[in-house]
Amino acid sequence: MLRRLFSYFVPINIHKKNSGVSKTLEVTWNNGQLVLDSKNTNYSYGSLQRILRKGLKYIGFERIKKFDSILVLGVAGGSVIRTLTDEIKFNGKITGVEIDPSIVDIANKYFKLDTIPNLEIVIDDAFEFVLKTKIQYDLIIIDIFQDTTMPNFLFEDFFINRINALLQTNGFILFNTMVITKKDEERNLVYKNKFGGNYSLRMYPKVETHNELFTIKKLN
């Protein structure tokens, strides 16, 4: 494909759409890879896929392969789901929650998410979904952004407690955050201190410059 070849020299945009939720969405060939971007940041594949792959490696691919169920809050183009299915060979149930139906349309058309047999996509607000579901998960991946902004509810006690209730014993949370300002650093430190002796938490700062990852294991 010529566009893919030329993308090693200059990014080539093939689709642009305005979304009421995510504002600007762009699908672009970049360095031979198809990526999904918002106006100011990478949403799927590219750097974001590298970031979340690192988080999954910290947890351990062989451990993840043995899990039964995974919840992904914030699907976008589905790069972390592709890592789970194509690289880790995870065959259990994956539930992806995405608030923006325009993103789901793009993910299906350009990244073929609808061809993954063990994936269910739910179009819903992550906060509302977490309130309603009664299922427990072995791994909960939280990757929710509106461009470069993270919703405040992700760091509030009610949401944190609800996520913890949905996590199986010995299960993991992988939380991708963006740290740009001093206020973001302080926010993450407050978040870290919300997990006591029943959890094992690790922070991984400066992953791809502005991202900070948390891996949190529920001990009992």
Image (cartoon, rainbow, N blue to C red):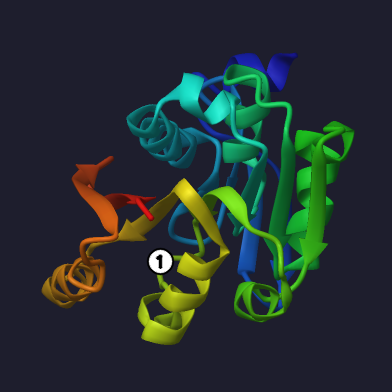
Q: Quadrant of the N terminus?
A: top right
Name the image quarter holding residue 118: top right
Pinpoint residue 18: horizontal percent, then vertical percent. 71, 69
Pinpoint residue 6: horizontal percent, then vertical percent. 59, 19
Q: Report the side of 182 relative to 67 (left or right).
A: left
Residue, x 47% and y 46% (percent of image)?
A: 171
Q: Residue 26, relative to residue 185: is it above or below?
A: above
* Residue nearest the viewer, comparing 80 with 165: 165
Does residue 210 appear in this view?
no
Does residue 41 appear in this view?
yes
Residue, x 70% and y 61% (percent of image)?
A: 135
Q: What residue sits right under mark 1 in the picture?
A: 148
* Residue nearest the viewer, comparing 168 with 92: 168
**SS under mark 1:** loop
Name the image quarter holding residue 45: top right
Q: Report the side of 22 relative to 185 (left or right).
A: right
Residue, x 63% and y 73% (percent of image)?
A: 130
Name the image quarter holding residue 87: top right
Pinpoint residue 140: horizontal percent, then vertical percent. 53, 53
Report the amino acid beneath label 1.
Answer: Thr
* Residue nearest the viewer, comparing 104 with 31: 104
Pinpoint residue 115: horizontal percent, then vertical percent. 88, 32
Q: Quadrant of the C terminus?
A: bottom left
Q: Report the side of 172 relative to 106 (left or right).
A: left
Q: Residue 176, relative to residue 144: is it above or below?
A: above
